[in-house]
Amino acid sequence: MEINREGGDCPHASGNVNAFALAAEVLWHRGIDLYATKYGGEDVPRILKGAEYFSKSNVDPPVETEDSGNITCDRICYAYEVAYNHYKNRLDEVYPLSYLGDAAEKVRPAADGVSTGDNAKFLPWTTLTHADLSP
């Protein structure tokens, strides 16, 4: 079964992943590593799994679900920048980042302040505070 979530609720669902990343960021600065949390013998931290899942839905859809078939998120979501900064820049790519970097690039505001995604007026601050924008 193929479900196309054009204009559906992919942005809100990815917002949950972003909220976990933001909470993990606060805790990181307090000496608690929520970013590293894994469950049931998983190899990849749960926040990274969620961020990669939503990144794939924007960069290389469709993504599989357990009960809804395949989902394509045609709208750019925003669960990327904070998690990407942690897993790439802090950990120096300990984990493979198959989609997260490409998705972060897609949602960053352009130099003229115009974003190609839904972030133009919502979360460009995460680019300012967490992106490695060096040339």
Image (spheres, helix red, strand yellow):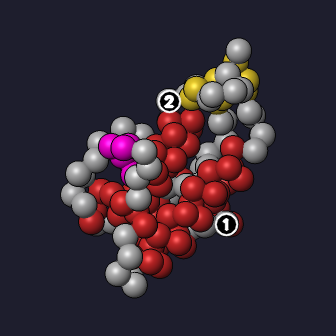
The percent coordinates of residue 96 (x first, y second) are: 29, 42
Which residue lies at the image location 64% right of the left edge and 62% below the top edge? Answer: 120
| Residue 122, disc | 1
Q: Position of residue 134 (x, y in %)?
A: 28, 66
Decide if residue 35 is on the left or right side of residue 50. Answer: left
How packed mark 1 is, by other alpha carbons closer than 10 Å (few <14, some 14-19, many 20 or more), is few
Describe residue 72's horizontal placement relative to residue 36 as left or right.
right
Range shown magenta: 41-45
Dot label at residue 77: none
**Cα separation between marks 2 and 1:** 24 Å
39 vs 17, left or right, is left
Q: Earlier in the sequence, mark 2 or mark 1?
A: 2
Residue 112 visible in this rendered orientation of the protein: no
User: Which quadrant is the N terminus positioned in?
Assistant: top right
Looking at the rendered structure, the kind of residue marked 2 is Asp
Q: Is residue 129 above or below residue 81?
A: below
Name the element at disc 2.
Answer: loop
Residue 111 to residue 47: above or below:
below
